[in-house]
Amino acid sequence: MNIIVTGGAGFIGGNFCHYMTKKYPEDTILCIDKLTYAGNLETLAPIMDKPNFKFFQADIADREAIYKIFQEEKPDIVVNFAAESHVDRSITDPEVFLRTNIIGTSVMLDACREYGITRYHQVSTDEVYGDLPLDRPDLFFTEDTPIHTSSPYSASKASADLLVQAYARTYKLPCTISRCSNNYGPYHFPEKLIPLIISNVLNDKKVPVYGKGENVRDWLYVEDHCIAIDLIIRKGTVGEVYNIGGHNEKTNLEVVKTVLDKLGKSEELISYVSDRPGHDRRYAIDPAKIHKELGWLPETTFETGIQKTVDWYLDNRTWWENIISGEYKNYYEKMYGNRG
Ligand code: NAD
Ligand code: DAU
């Protein structure tokens, strides 16, 4: 099979390309990525020369470029990871989120209609459900929870989901959608909480915690997300949405303290800064459907996953040092420089 993976030079898409090229030598992975600030060919270096991997630099919102790839490569399956993914950036500059996450998704769907595929899979997020109160630990997001977004990022991802569902119903396009909780693991761009803590701490910098650090995220090791998507594209039911998460809720402060502890550093490095506008309080996935229908359960505990992640950042300093020494410096200054 020929499988298009968009956004494969990013965090989760990159891990997915590694996973799929290793597991299915008989399939060809066709990675499409624009190489924005978040895309990194270093992430793909270990698989770039594999016979079952091809890389195309292209923008998913560029219809001509995308149609050409479909025409020449004749994909069977498309997995759309490509997106602008950082909530904070969506608050300062929403427009590119609309272009990539909505228009880009519509171009991918049109290409699938035009050339025919057996499955289009949209990689969505639990953020489309909005947030849950901190004092109701009994509540979880199910696939039936109404869409209720908070940030320009989540609004753009929810719009994309609605488009996918519209194409599935109107044009009978064979689609599935997955909505996953927060991922962590290797190749995670340092603007996101866990790699930001690790890279700051290893450079003896303070760790910025938004508000009081009480917000809750439901963390999943990235390989478990890859396994779930692989199961959905092979065994999932067309037209369905699948939530992915492992009941691993932690406050941000708990996460920060765990990473500081793993690195043998003092909690004095914590710096409380002003909150993210519209900050979602709690995400918590109910993964009962994917467990019941596809037998999926996370394989990596937080204790194991966070140790593997810290070890990966210690062993792969060049990967993230190349990032933080470049344009990222300007981003960091703008985002955190004058933050009280
Ligand atoms: P990322 O920001 O690390 O990577 C995104 C990739 O998409 C980059 O390689 C970038 O170059 C590429 N890209 C951006 N715009 C593009 C365009 N117009 N055309 C082609 N490529 C483009 O993101 P991530 O964290 O790996 O997230 C991947 C997907 O998973 C996203 O759709 C995101 O919404 C979703 N998701 C992420 C998480 C998480 O915790 N990171 C959780 C649930 C869902
Ligand atoms: O839930 C899935 C989502 O998880 C994905 O859809 C997004 O693409 C992904 O970026 C992630 O979104 P979050 O906003 O939850 O992730 P982030 O790493 O930016 O922040 C995690 C929590 O940590 C959040 O409550 C904000 C807080 N935070 C973040 C940063 C970068 C801090 O306290 N300090 C920081 O410096």
Image (cartoon, rainbow, N blue to C red):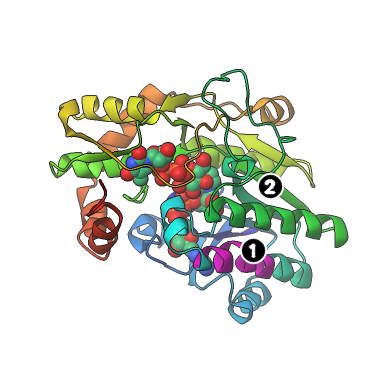
Q: Residue furthest top?
A: 138
Residue 289 drawn above or below residue 84: above
Q: Quadrant of residue 247?
A: top right
Q: Residue furthest left?
A: 204
The percent coordinates of residue 276 (x first, y second) are 41, 45
Quarter of the N terminus within the rendering: bottom right
Identify the main secondary structure in magenta.
Answer: helix
Asked if the stretch drawn in magenta spans residue 107, the answer is: yes
Q: Residue furthest bottom?
A: 64
The percent coordinates of residue 228 (x first, y second) are 60, 37
Residue 54 drawn above or below residue 292: below
Q: Judge left or right: residue 162 versus residue 263.
A: right
Q: Quadrant of residue 291?
A: top right
Q: CA distance from mark 2 to mark 1?
A: 12 Å
> Tag 1: residue type?
Thr
> Tag 2: residue type?
Ile
Residue 315 visible within the image: no
Magenta-drawn segment: 96-108
Secondary structure under the numbered disc 1 in the rendered image = helix
Residue at x-position 37% and y-position 22%? 303
Label 1 sits on residue: 105
Asked if the stretch drawn in magenta spans residue 27, the answer is: no
Label 2 sits on residue: 177
Residue at x-position 79% and y-position 47%? 239
